[in-house]
């Protein structure tokens, strides 16, 4: 489960970076790229949040408030 | 003016006002730390001068922009300026996330006797805790931090109660992510030239940001009441540094969004030219992603 979460975070960071490139580029094309990338990033973030909440609800993952030995 | 390659700015007094503001702030701060009576008020004065400078200077830039004094070359330099600012912000949060990961993955397990490190040696893996803090339990969150060393051995502080992940943190994540969605709708409306929708979604975004800050203050109140403080060992300090600086960034974001809303009301921006909106929108999305990272690494994983 942890790996899925991290994989989604990586894609979110990637789309945020892609939006930045669009912003620096500017003009019609850059502006378009920026908007589309940001739309992907918010969509994925909402999905990830829903996934976390659902997994927690189903008991697949435990919140950090349960103490676990680190080793 | 708009045809030349390099835009040469006119002379201005704002930089010197900024310098006076920063100097006043630090003189006040230094004296405050020495317990001088007027320290605090001089700090406040310095801050006021800096805010005055920011509004004055940026206001001048906005007016020049609206009056069409800038060419494409200036537009490009604004975009690059924003990207360097963002780079510094990414590095800033990378340092604090790095501290969190280092503590969780390396230093706390080492203190508990894990790994072949300089304290333990490969064969006697549990020596570390024996020599440094006997009885140290490597857990995360690290509830029991070694406290004052008594004659007879080591005392462990009894720690604090943890913030419930399902409560305010989950609600706040929902609020901030929703603000990301409303901002995306605002962005869409701006690109399509739908003025009223743009204003509506901007107000929604700002309101959600303010609500987030309110709940964050409430959460700090709960956490502090339950004994979680900056001094509560590595968990407390990483928790407050990360969430505190994040909250500070949300505050800046709300201020910037409000300025953008004001500019929209004044009729600035059109569907093709709205770099200020783009800069602030990216910043808000960035702060949103930082929170998502915090929510996952501080509260879940």
Image: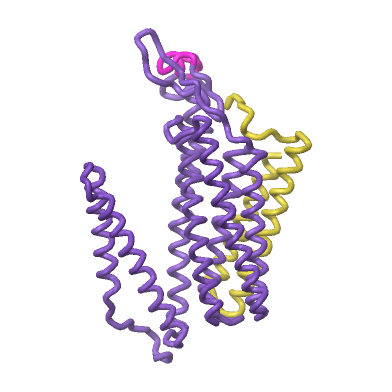
Chain colours: A yellow, B purple
Q: Identify the residue at horizontal 52%, vertical 26% (top origin).
A: B143
Number of marks drawn: 0
Which of the 4 quarters of the picture holds residue B47? bottom left
Say which of B86 and B255 sits in front: B255
Q: Relative to B270, does residue B200 appear above or below in the rendering?
A: above
The residue lying toward the viewer, choosing from B76 and B142, is: B142
Outermost residue, top side: B152
In the figure, is residue B7 to the left or right of B140? left
Q: Nearer the viewer, residue B271 or B218?
A: B218
Residue B131 is inside the magenta segment: yes
Which residue is located at x 48 percent, y 25 percent? B110
- Front-most of residues B183 and A15: B183
Q: Is residue B184 left or right of residue B282?
A: right
Which span is picked out in magenta?
Answer: B122-135
- Measured as percent of width and height from the top left, residue B117 is found at 45, 24
Looking at the figure, which quarter contains the N terminus of chain B? Answer: bottom left
Horizontal and vertical percent position of residue B220: 52, 41
- Look at the image and say whether residue A35 sits in the magenta stretch: no
Residue B198 spot, x, y in % from top left: 64, 73
Residue B49 position in % (x across, y down):
30, 64
From what the image shows, is residue B61 above or below residue B20?
Answer: below
- Apparent side of residue B204 relative to residue B275 in the rendered image (left or right): right
Secondary structure mainly formed by the magenta segment: loop
């Amino acid at each position: 489960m942890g790996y899925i979460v991290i994989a989604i975070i990586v894609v979110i960071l990637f789309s945020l970076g892609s939006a930045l490139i669009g912003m620096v580029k500017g003009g019609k094309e850059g502006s378009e790229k920026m908007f589309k990338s940001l739309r992907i990033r918010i969509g994925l973030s909402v999905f990830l949040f829903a996934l976390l909440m659902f997994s927690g609800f189903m008991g697949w993952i435990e919140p950090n408030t349960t103490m676990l030995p680190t080793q | 003016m708009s045809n030349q390659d390099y835009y040469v700015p006119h002379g201005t007094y704002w930089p010197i006002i900024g310098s006076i503001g920063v100097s006043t702030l630090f003189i006040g701060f230094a004296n405050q730390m020495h317990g001088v009576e007027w320290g605090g008020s001089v700090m406040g004065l310095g801050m006021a001068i800096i805010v005055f400078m920011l509004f004055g200077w940026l206001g001048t830039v906005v007016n020049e922009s609206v009056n069409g004094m800038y060419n494409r070359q200036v537009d490009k330099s604004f975009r690059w300026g924003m990207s360097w600012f963002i780079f510094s912000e990414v590095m800033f949060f990378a340092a604090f996330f790095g501290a969190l990961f280092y503590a969780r993955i390396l230093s706390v397990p080492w203190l508990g006797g894990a790994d072949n490190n300089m304290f333990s040696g490969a064969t006697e893996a549990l020596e570390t805790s024996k020599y440094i803090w006997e009885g140290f339990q490597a857990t995360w969150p690290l509830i029991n931090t070694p406290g004052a060393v008594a004659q007879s051995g080591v005392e462990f502080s009894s720690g604090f109660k943890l913030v419930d992940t399902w409560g305010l943190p989950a609600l706040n994540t929902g609020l901030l992510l929703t603000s990301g969605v409303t901002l995306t709708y605002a962005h869409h409306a701006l690109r399509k030239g739908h003025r009223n929708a743009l204003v509506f979604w901007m107000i929604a975004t700002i309101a959600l940001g303010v609500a987030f800050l309110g709940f964050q203050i409430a959460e700090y109140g709960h956490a502090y009441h339950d004994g979680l403080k900056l001094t509560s060992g590595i968990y407390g300090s990483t928790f407050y540094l990360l969430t505190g600086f994040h909250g500070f960034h949300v505050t800046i974001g709300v201020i910037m969004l409000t300025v953008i809303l004001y500019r929209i009301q004044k009729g600035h921006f059109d569907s093709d030219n709205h770099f200020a909106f783009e800069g602030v929108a990216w910043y808000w999305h960035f702060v949103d992603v930082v929170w998502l990272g915090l929510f996952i690494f501080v509260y879940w994983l």
